[in-house]
Image (tube, rainbow, N blue to C red):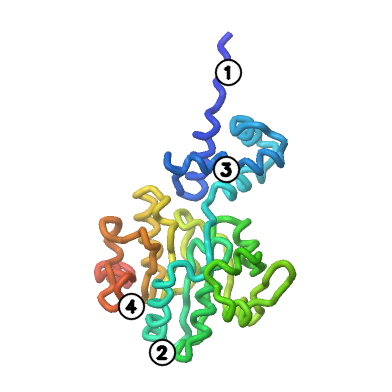
Amino acid sequence: MTAAVRPNGPAVLSALLEARTGQQLSDDRAWRMDTSLGPLLRELGLGTLDQLVQRLLAGADPSLGDRIVDRLLNQESSFFRDAAAFDLIGGALADLCSDRRARIWSAGCSTGQEPLSLAMLVAERADAPAFEIVATDVSEGALARARAGRYTQFEIQRGLPIRRMIRWFDAADPDWVAKPELMRALSFRRANLVADEPPPGRFDLVMCRNVLLYLTPAGRAAVFDRLARALRPGGLLVLGAGETVIGQTHAFAPSARFRGLYETTASQRSDVAA
């Protein structure tokens, strides 16, 4: 009698992450599996990843796949992460939207620090336009935290000086909660950058930082096309410090006006207009 072949736990979990989000868990990130899923294993009373996969494949818990994916996603975030990028954004928005409401999309917003940083940045500028920010993420767990606008003392101090902390957050011992006037500019929704269409409407600025580097080349190309379709003519794309459009897509090129940001190419604008 032939013994049943037991599934390779890490391989199944990597495939699950890629199927649900388009993200690849490369060899140099494989350590995240044990680290990220350890608390879930303890919560479920399981000892190994193989046991977790067996429960997943049994199908008795329909929410288990989402819980696993949420734990495997890299939700590293902080306020005003990469300050130089935010310095560029403030001036760019004032130039682009001097006479109308600015629309911003924070794609892959994680637990909300990026869209809140954008809201603070724009609200504090005397020359800033009225604005709205749409923030999306594939993780419902991250979005729940983002919608609450609630952060620990450790999180609130990462990138946020005391002046801004006091102005825009209320103490809720032991945490801090974003003020309602800041949250009113934000709307949050679940979206998979690889599989879903962009939020409705066109945007003046799209921030998609530290997401694309985890995707396959085909996934990156598809996401770049979606981001390009979401931008208004003259709109700008902001990527992470380790990301670029060069050699990745024909939809974007480095901006001649704002060094470090990206604009849609003439061919892409023609395709959208058609």
Q: How far apart are marks 2 and 4 (CA)?
A: 13 Å
- List the residue tagged with mark 2: 98
Crowding near pointer 3: few (<14 within 10 Å), some, many (20+)?
few
The three-letter code of the residue at mark 4 reads Gly
The three-letter code of the residue at mark 1 reads Ala
**Residue 6: x percent and y percent?**
56, 23
Inspect this view and state whether residue 138 appears: yes
Left or right relative to 140: residue 133: left
Give the SS element for disc 4: strand
Q: Residue 49 carries which label?
A: none
Among numbered discs 4 and 3, the one appearing first in the sequence: 3
**Residue 33: x percent and y percent?**
54, 41
Which one is nearer the viewer's eye here, 71 or 162? 162
The three-letter code of the residue at mark 2 reads Ser
Q: Tell whether label 3 touches label 2 (CB within 8 Å).
A: no
- List the residue tagged with mark 4: 234
Q: Tell whether label 1 touches label 4 (CB within 8 Å).
A: no
Q: Distance between the residues labelled 4 and 3?
A: 43 Å
Inspect this view and state whether residue 274 appears: no
Q: Which residue is drawn at 41% across and 69% down?
A: 230
**Residue 128: x percent and y percent?**
46, 87
Give the quarter of the image for residue 47.
Answer: top right
Residue occupying the far right of the picture = 173
- Looking at the rendered image, the disc whose residue lies closer to the viewer, 4 or 3, is 3
The three-letter code of the residue at mark 3 reads Thr
Give the SS element for disc 1: loop
Residue occupying the far top of the picture = 1
Vertical position of residue 100 compared to residue 42: above or below: below
- List the residue tagged with mark 3: 35
- List the residue tagged with mark 1: 4
Q: Distance between the residues labelled 4 and 1?
A: 58 Å
